[in-house]
Amino acid sequence: MMKISLILPIYNEQAILGEVLEKYISELRSITKAIPGSSYEIVAVNDGCTDASPEILMKEAKLNRSLRIVNLTQRFGKEAAVTAGFETVSGDVTILADVTLLNPLGIIERVVGEYQSGHPIVYAYREGIGWENTKHSFSHSLIRMAAKVFSIPGEYTGRAHIMLYSKEVTDILKKLPHKNKFMRTMDNWTGYEIHTIGYTSSYSKDEVQRKTRVASNKMRRDGYHPPHRSRAREHTPSIVYSITSFILALMFLGGWIALEIFFGIDIWWHVVAFITFAVIIMCGVLFYARAIMIKRIGTVHHRDDEILYEVENVVN
């Protein structure tokens, strides 16, 4: 007998939300049907959506009592939404997944199988090909560095697109008092070994983008028109500062080379120029790392007197 809890942090996913929910519900029903006496729940955390996602969730919740909706009062960021989900779940197994078409049918069953084999923490990550693997490696190296620079508690444990936790692990994570909660830096504090598996996606990213565009166009034809939103995000200023730093570095490098070619400069000026160039580049890297952390967590620092998240209501 086992209860499976699936946490889905949601922010403006109207184009694909219905299809993804259908996929997860179908798989969870299949798993619980195969295990006598088992059940499931889906905790969908509405992280201040401004599109039709809340309406889609409510429509599904009326048909499926196993879907619970946690509505936050505003957008607090993904990790705050995840934390709110953890406070709500009641299962023996808690699974954290994204609302994405890239996760194939069968991956939830696979991670549950790994748990049944004796692994209390399971990380499942999408395997890339060629340049995508290189990009992932670079991105996660930056996250590891940013977690240290911006004092995120714990040690970054690597990439994961789906994470499973036993009830014992979930209870430990719930009790952690830290405001800067980023699960992939705090999981190794639980004292349990992290078991990692790889999987391939159902679609390429280009196929997902095409399917998303088709779904968005269909929803507009059906009358769903989300309010106009600025394309700017919380991490946009850091991206701008990062690009500005790299442009300044290139301009500085050009001036340095020009001075050497046309006038010649003393060795000490080369040393000063190199240090200045390195500092500008490092600033650009740090701003980019900060942008990544804000995008992943929602904010880099939480003050002690600041609300991590605020629940408006819980449906079902």
Image: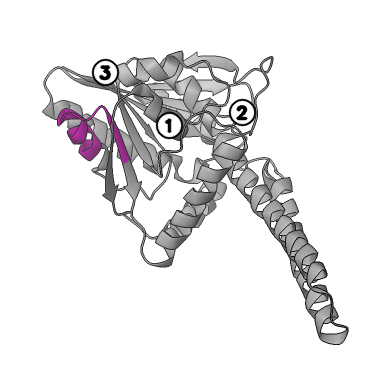
Seen at 62% across and 29% down, the residue is 75
Which dot, 2 or 1, sits closer to the camera? 2
Residue in the foreground of this view, choosing between 288 and 22: 288
Comes first in the chain, label 2 or label 1: 1
Amino acid of disc 2: Phe
Q: Which residue was labeled with disc 3?
A: 92
User: What is the quadrant of residue 208 in the picture?
Assistant: bottom left
Q: Which residue was labeled with disc 2?
A: 76
Amino acid of disc 3: Asp
As displayed, is residue 110 above or below residue 267? Answer: above
Question: Are discs 2 and 1 less than 8 Å apart at CB?
Answer: no
On the image, the x and y values in percent for residue 294 come to: 62, 39
On the image, the x and y values in percent for residue 108 come to: 27, 37
The segment highlighted magenta reads: 109-123
Which quadrant is home to the C terminus? top left
Q: CA distance from mark 2 to mark 1?
A: 15 Å
Q: CA distance from mark 3 to mark 1?
A: 17 Å
Seen at 80% across and 68% down, the residue is 268
* Residue 80 in view: yes
Q: Which element type, helix, strand or loop, lies under badge 1?
A: strand
Seen at 40% across and 25% down, the residue is 189
As displayed, is residue 291 above or below residue 309? Answer: below
Amino acid of disc 1: Leu
Which dot, 3 or 1, sits closer to the camera? 3
Which quadrant is home to the N terminus? top left
Comes first in the chain, label 3 or label 1: 1
Seen at 31% across and 31% down, the residue is 164
Residue in the foreground of this view, choosing between 80 and 140: 140
Within the magenta stretch, is there residue 116?
Answer: yes
Q: Which residue was labeled with disc 1?
A: 8
Residue extending furthest toward the bottom: 262
Comes first in the chain, label 2 or label 3: 2
